[in-house]
Image (cartoon, rainbow, N blue to C red):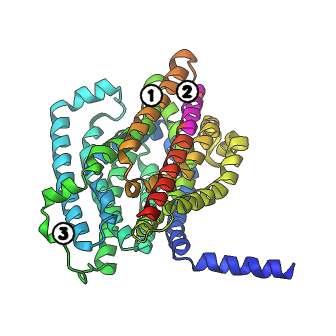
Amino acid sequence: MLNLVITLRQKTHEVWRSRFVRSVAVVATGTAGAQAITMAFSPLITRLYGPEAYGVQGTFMAILGVAIPVGALAYPIAIVLPRRDEEALGIIQLSAYISVFIAVLLAFGLWMGGEEVVSLLEIESVGNFIYLVPVAMLFASWKQIAQQWLIRKKEFGVIARSALATSGVLNSARALAGFVHPIGAVLIVLATLVEALHTLLMLIGIRKRTTIDRSEPSEALKFSIIKLARRHRDFPLYRAPQIMINAASQSLPVLMLSAFFGPSTAGFYMLSKMVMGMPTTLVGMAVSDVFYARITEASHNNENLSRHILRATGVLAAIGIIPFSIVIFFGPWVFSLVFGPEWNVAGEYARWLAFFFFFNLVNKPSNAAVPILGIQRGLLFYEALSTGGKVAGFLLGVYWLNSDIWAIAMFSIIGIVAYSGVMFWIYFCAVKWDRDAKIT
């Protein structure tokens, strides 16, 4: 028995000494603090604003979620990959130019036909605030650029602190504004401003904490921005459409619930999605960001990638099983207790979304490995099939069963099947990568 205890202590010490685990802990701590602030304010904010205001904000965020992947054509994700910093800086420059161009182009398009877009999508509740989408998209693109540079430099503490500070400011502003003017428009404006604040805080951290490594001669200087764009063309060709399709599939329930059942129903869904997404935000994104840097390094060192993916996936499954199970069994009661009795329906939605977000959580390591494995084209094909299936399931619930809960249930079930399939596919691609690496 004593030997077992000693062995467990040694293993625990080894795990904690792991740079990967410590990096995840740093990011997760900051994210946990940010989520704790959000949860602490949520009972007050949900009572101040109500389901309809949440629905208006959710509709705006759904549109923004589809626009953001196009903002810099997914080039920022490539910042982590080059061996040398100077090539990464070239990708940063490329991403910044593209983000400004696309934001201006989108703003011009909305200026010409914004009213038609609002009418076509049946999002009259958002109204003129749709013109904030290009602004928020630009800030979100710059935030992604800054975050990917910090991931490259392994400055996870800066990411954590900026998330913590942003959450504190945002939720304080929501609460104060809610006492004065509790409407959805306030939430939309704050959602736009917070993207700018988050970006600014990370840029300050970059200025203070990061340096450019010029110790090795760089071939990147020989390449123009255009040649860098061509070298990493997989990102705009395959990854940007994949992320956009995924965002569209995530945004579809909000838009359709608002159109068919009203903004209050969309508000119920928005809250349940926010709460169910917290484990993914808290742990999944922390692991994903750190794991992306780690598995990139592992590929440079010819390490076993499939083993890394399997281990990280197992850890996330163990972390997520208990909190999601609690919601599956007690969702309506928990939501009514925490957010007020009028949010009981959100708890019913959360029961089904718990299944979906559990698989979304454990999928993060596999998804992070895609650029390294060079299978972004295949991921785009998968995303198109997956989204088509989820859309079909949701429409089946809306039109045939005429039920908001069944629509969400069908959406979640098909999502579970899709996530399971893509995880197996990516894992076997990693196994093939490992086998080929040994041969060479």
Q: Does residue 310 appear in the picture of this structure? A: yes
Picture quarter with the N terminus: bottom right
How many tags in the picture?
A: 3
Contact? badges 2 and 1 (CB < 8 Å): yes
Q: Residue 249: name its quadrant.
A: top left
For image coordinates 56% across by 18% down, the residue present is 402
The disc labelled 1 sits on which kind of residue? Met
Query: What is the magenta segment's predominant secondary structure?
Result: helix
Task: Give the magenta range.
Answer: 406-417
For mark 3, does the 10 Å Cα neighbourhood hold few (<14), some (14 to 19), or many (20 or more) residues?
Answer: some
Which element is circle 2 on? helix
Distance from disc 3 to disc 1, alpha carbons, whole Å, reads 47 Å
For mark 1, does the 10 Å Cα neighbourhood hold few (<14), some (14 to 19), or many (20 or more) residues?
Answer: many
Whichever of callouts 2 and 1 sits on the residue coming sooner in the sequence is 1
For image coordinates 26% across by 47% down, the residue present is 236
Whichever of callouts 3 and 2 sits on the residue coming sooner in the sequence is 3
Which element is circle 1 on? helix
The disc labelled 2 sits on which kind of residue? Ala
Left or right: where 343 falls relative to 198: right
Q: Label 1, on which residue?
A: 256
Q: Between residue 254 and residue 298, name the one nearer to us.
A: 298
Picture quarter with the C terminus: bottom left
Q: Between residue 332 and residue 40, name the one nearer to us.
A: 332
| x and y percentages locating residue 29 in the rendered image | 54, 69
For image coordinates 62% across by 34% down, the residue present is 345
Left or right: where 71 falls relative to 148: left
Q: Label 3, on which residue?
A: 220
Which element is circle 3 on? helix
The disc labelled 3 sits on which kind of residue? Ala
Q: Label 2, on which residue?
A: 407
